[in-house]
Image (cartoon, rainbow, N blue to C red):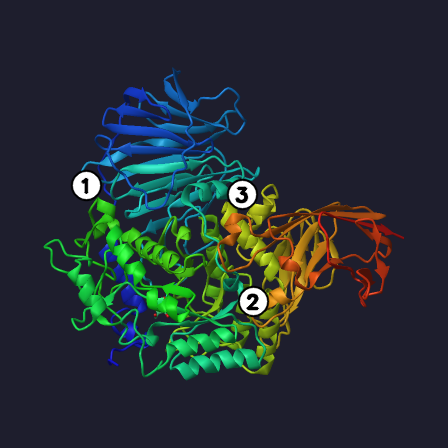
Amino acid sequence: MSKEKTNFGNKLAQGFTKGVLNITVPLLNHRIVPFRWQAIGGIVTHKKLENSVLIHCENGFIEVKIITPSIWRVRAFHDTLPKYHKSWASREPDFNLKIKTVQEYGSLTIKEDKNVSSKNDLIIKVSEVDSTITFERINGDILHKDSEPISMSKRGSWIKTKKIALKKEYHVGFGEKTGKLIKNGRKMIFWNTDQTAYTVREDPLYQSEPLQISLREDGTAFGIFYDNYRYSVIKLEKTSTSKVNYYTEKGPLCYYVFAGPTLKDVSKQIGELNGKLPLPPKWVLGHHQSRWSYYPEEKVREVARNFREKEIPCDSIHLDIDYMDGFRCFTWNKERFPNPQKMVADLRDDGFKLIIMTDPGLKADPEWTIYQNCVAKDYHCKLANGNPYLGKVWPGKCIFPDFTSPAVRVWWGKLYKDYVELGIEGFWIDMAEPSIFDIRRTAPFEVQHNMDGQPESHQYAHNVYGNAFAIATREGLDVLRKNKRTFIFGRTAYSGIQRYASTWTGDNYSTWKHLQQSIPMVLSMGLSGQPFVAVDIGGFTFDCKAELLTRWYQTGIFYPFCRNHSANATKPQEPWVFGEETEKIIKKTIEFRYMLLPYLYTILWEASKDGLPMMRPLFMEFPTDKETYNEKWHNSQFMVGDKLLIAPVLTKLGKNQKAVTKKIYLPEGRWFDYWTQEYLSGGKEITREVTINQLPLFVKAGSTLPIGPIVPFVEKASEHPITLAIYPDNEIQGLAYFDDGDTKEFEEGNYNLLTIRGNDTPKKLSIDILQSGKITDLPLTNEILHLRVHTKKTPDEIKVNDNIAQKDFETENLSWKISDDMKHYTIVIKIPKFPMDIQVKYK
Ligand code: GLC
C-alpha cells in the first residue's frame, strides 16, 4: 500500500484553505466578460424550412425551430450555420411539426402551422429592425422579450442575450446553486468546480445547469434552457420586471423555451427535452451509510452488524477511495479487503448492497495494466503539444481518459466487469469536474478533448467531462448488468445528467446553515431535471453533533436519496454514536422513511416517467397560492410528491429550551396533521412547539398514501401486506405503483399500478380502485390489502364489491375494525379483486 496522504486535513494542506480557495478559484478560472460587443443587426432576409426558419441578419444568423408545440429552440451564430452542433444535454424529440411565418408590423412572426390553435401556443416575433425576439402566448401574454439584440463580442467568441419580463417574476432552477430557492438578483457562474467544503455563498459548485424557470403569482410559468456547456454567466437583475442577462464564452447561442403554462408543465417539458432518470432499483430508496472511508473489511462488517443489531434500517454501505490499492480504480487493497467476493456476498445475504467509488484519474503507474492499456490505446487526454496530460489527484500523478470520445467510453464501461461479477450493485463516481490538486483545481485550458469527433480544448469542453464520465459508466454497466437496473451517482454534472447518474451536493459542512441550505438546493436541482438527489446527512466537513444529526435526519429522510456521509478527519456520525437517546430518535426517523417506501417508490416511478421531482417546492403544488412565493416558507418547507408537506426544524434549541416554536404555512386546501389526525384548514399560518423527537408533517386532505411495514431493508417489504391510508376530503385520489424493484421488466408492462379515486360526504365514502399493468398480485403478497380511513366517523355498513365487511372478524375474508384511539378504521381485504368498489355508510 502506498503512503499517499488521504485525509481531509492533508487535502487542505495542499493549499486549499478556505481563504486561498475563495481567492484562487475566481482568479484562475474566472473570465472577464467582454466590454465591446456587436449587435446581430436587423433582418436582411429569411428562409422558411419545414419546422424552422433561418434568419439572415446584418451580422449573423438566427434560427428558430419548433421542437414540440411547447418547446421551441433559438440559435444564433456569428457566421454561417455550423454543420454540427452537438448538445450534451438535450435530445430533441422529433414531432415532425410545421411552422408558418408572416411578415407584419415590422416583425417576422413565427408560429406552428396548424388549423386549431390552443390558448397556450407560442408565437415568436423577430423584429425586422434589430432582430430582438419576443415570445408570447396566442392570447398576447408576453413571456419575455429581448431587452437588447443578441450580440457577439468584438474580440473572442462570446455571445450574449438579454431578456426582460413584463410582469413580476420569480426565477428558479439553475441546478446546484447555493442560496435561496428564488434567485432574483443573483449572478451565477456555470463552470464545474470542486469547491472542497463550500460555504453557503459559494458559486460555482460542481454542476452547471443553465436552466431558468420563471414563475408568476397567477400560477403560470415558463422556462429557458441555455444549452451551452461552455463557461457561462446568468445575471438576474432585481428589478420588478426582472431582467435576465446570459453570456457564454463561446457561441453559438442556443436556448430552448418551455411554454409551461404551469411549473409542472415546465418540469415535464424539461424531462421531454433533456431526458429522465431511468427508474433505479427500489433498494436505493433505503437508508445509505457512507464514510470516507470504511476499512478494513472488519470495519465494514461492524457497521453492518450495528445496523442489524440495533434494528436501524439500512440498505447500503458505501466504500470510499480507501478500498482501492493505492487509489487505483478497479483494484482492491488486499490487506484491507482480502476477500471482497465473500464480503459482498455476506453483506448481500444480510440485506446490504455495497456501493463502490471510482474516479476518473488513473494512477500514472507504468506497472499497472489499466494505465498501460489506456496509454497503449491512446485514450488519455493530451496537452496541445500531444504529450499526455498528467494531473495530481488522490493517487498522485494521474492520466485522465478522454470520456468525450465514444471509443474511450466503451473501453471504460467494460472495466466494471469484475465489480459486476463480484455482485456490486451501486456505483459512486466522483471528482469528474475533473478535480485536480493544483492551483487551478482542474485541467489546464489547453488539454484536448475528442468531443465525439468535434475536438475542443478543455477551456470549452470542461463542463461536459463529468457527463461523459457518467455516460461511459452507465452504458458499460447497462451492458454488463443486462436486464438489471443499475444505480450510479456522481457529483459533477451538466444538464441532462439524470439520464446517466443521480447526484449529490458534494462536500458540505456539519452546520445548521448547511442543513437549511440543503432544502433550496435539492429543490432547485429537482426543478432542473434531477429528481433523485442526496445531501450528505450530518454534513461532510467538521464534526457533527447529536442535535444537528437528529434534525438533519428529520429532513434527510425526505431527500430523494437518503445518505449519511462524512469526511475522514471528522468524528464518526453513524446514527448510534451520540448515545441511546439520539439513536432512538434517529432510528424512529429512519423507520418512518421505510414505512413510506411504497409512496416514495410511486413518486420515484412518476419522476422517471414524466420528469417531476420527488421533493417539490410549495409553489409547484399550489401555484395560485401567493403565499407560497414568500421566502419565509419555501426555503424551509417542502412537499414530497403532491401529498406530504414537511416543515422540519432547522435551528438549534436555545439553552434550557425544550421545544422550537415553528411557524408553518399550510397552503390553500385542507390538511391532516399526520401525528394528531387533526383536520386543518389551509391558506394560513400555524404554530407548533416542536421537541427534539418531533417532526411537523401534514397530509393533504383527499390523499391516498400507500404505506408499508417497517423492515430492516427494502427487499423485506415485499413479504408484508400493503396499506392504503386514506385521508378523506370531497375528492380523494392517489396512486400506488409496484414492480419487481430490480429488473427492467416493468418496461414491458410488468408492473402493478393501483389508481384510487373517491369522494367523501358526511354520510358516505365511496372509493374505486382500478388496476393496470400485467402484474396483478405482486404488492399483495399474503394477498392482503388494508384500507385505513382516517376519520372519527363510525361506519354503519361497509361493502367491498357488494360484499358486506364483518366488524372485528379478522378471520373473515373481509372485515373492518376501529382503532383504539378511534381516529381511524381499517378495512382488511384478503385476496382483493380489482376493479374494487368500496362503499361506506356512516351513522
Ligand atoms: C470528495 C468527495 C467526498 C469523498 C472524498 C474522498 O471530496 O466529494 O464525498 O468522500 O472525495 O473520496
Mark 1, other Cα within 10 Å: few <14 / some 14–19 / many ≥20: few
Q: Is residue 684 visible?
A: yes
Determine the image quadrant of residue 379: bottom left
Q: Is residue 638 visible?
A: no
Determine the image quadrant of residue 680: bottom right
Picture coordinates of residue 177, whole percent (x, y)? 41, 54
Which residue is under mark 1? 156
Which residue is under mark 2? 715
Picture coordinates of residue 571, whole percent (x, y)? 43, 79
At 24% across and 53% down in the image, what residue appears?
407
- The quadrant in which the N terminus is found is bottom left
Q: Hey, what amino acid is under mark 2?
A: Glu
Which residue is under mark 3? 264
Quick one: SS at disc 3? helix
Whichever of callouts 1 and 3 sits on the residue coming sooner in the sequence is 1
Mark in front: 3 vs 2? 2
At 39% across and 56% down in the image, what residue appears?
478
Judge left or right: residue 177 versus residue 821: left
Mark in front: 2 vs 1? 2
Q: Is residue 164 above or below residue 623?
A: above
At 48% across and 21% down in the image, what residue appears?
114
Mark 3, other Cα within 10 Å: few <14 / some 14–19 / many ≥20: many
Out of 745 and 703, give the one closest to the viewer: 745
Q: CA distance from mark 3 to mark 2?
A: 32 Å
Judge left or right: residue 601 versus residue 765: left
Quick one: SS at disc 2? helix
